[in-house]
Image (spheres, rainbow, N blue to C red):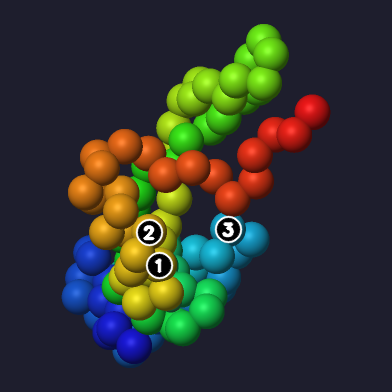
Amino acid sequence: MNEIRCPACGETEELLGESDAEGAITITCESCEAVFRRGIRRCERCGTDDLYDAPVAVVEKSRGSQLSIVSTVTREFCWVCDRDLIDAQRRSRRPLMPDELPTT
Ligand SMILES: [Zn+2]
Ligand SMILES: [Zn+2]
């Protein structure tokens, strides 16, 4: 676990953390009362914090049965669990396809 440090005064002990719905922690420094947020970037499967942001296609079904990419979103992938996906994305330089494609 990385050490959490107040960005304002450098305090590492007197910190009050509260996790929120987005999975980030809101931390209040009891020494200088600065409030800051710390995101938790951690793989749900293996627990590593070694993550990679990769673009994922947002796909919509257009006329006929053609799927077209309407935009991309950034998603976190794990260097341990998603190694193949990350390698493929970096090689192709194209967004990854989403897990679920629209079927109707
Ligand atoms: Zn502080
Ligand atoms: Zn993982």
Which residue, given by chain and number where applicable, does mark 3 sit on?
22
Identity, as a three-letter code, of the amino acid under mark 1: Asp
Q: Identify which residue is drawn at 75% across, 34% down.
A: 103
The verdict on label 1 being within 8 Å of ligand 2 is yes
Which residue, given by chain and number where applicable, does mark 1 sit on?
82
How far is mark 1 from mark 3, CA to CA? 22 Å
Are the residues at dot 3 and dot 2 in contact (C-beta closer than 8 Å)?
no
Q: Identify which residue is drawn at 31% across, 79% down.
A: 4
Which residue, given by chain and number where applicable, does mark 2 sit on?
85
Residues packed near mark 1 inside 10 Å, few (<14), some (14 to 19) or many (20 plus) = some
Along the line of sight, the residue nearer the viewer: 83 or 22: 83
In the rendered view, would you say 1 is above or below 58?
below
3 or 2: mark nearer the eye: 2
Q: Which residue lies most toward the front here?
A: 65
Identity, as a three-letter code, of the amino acid under mark 2: Leu
Q: Quadrant of the C terminus?
A: top right
Could you say whether the residue bearing mark 2 is in a helix, strand or loop?
helix
Indicate left or right for 84 with 10 as reference: right
Ligand 2 shows up in the quarter that is bottom left
Q: Which residue lies most toward the right here?
A: 104
Name the image quarter holding residue 34: bottom left
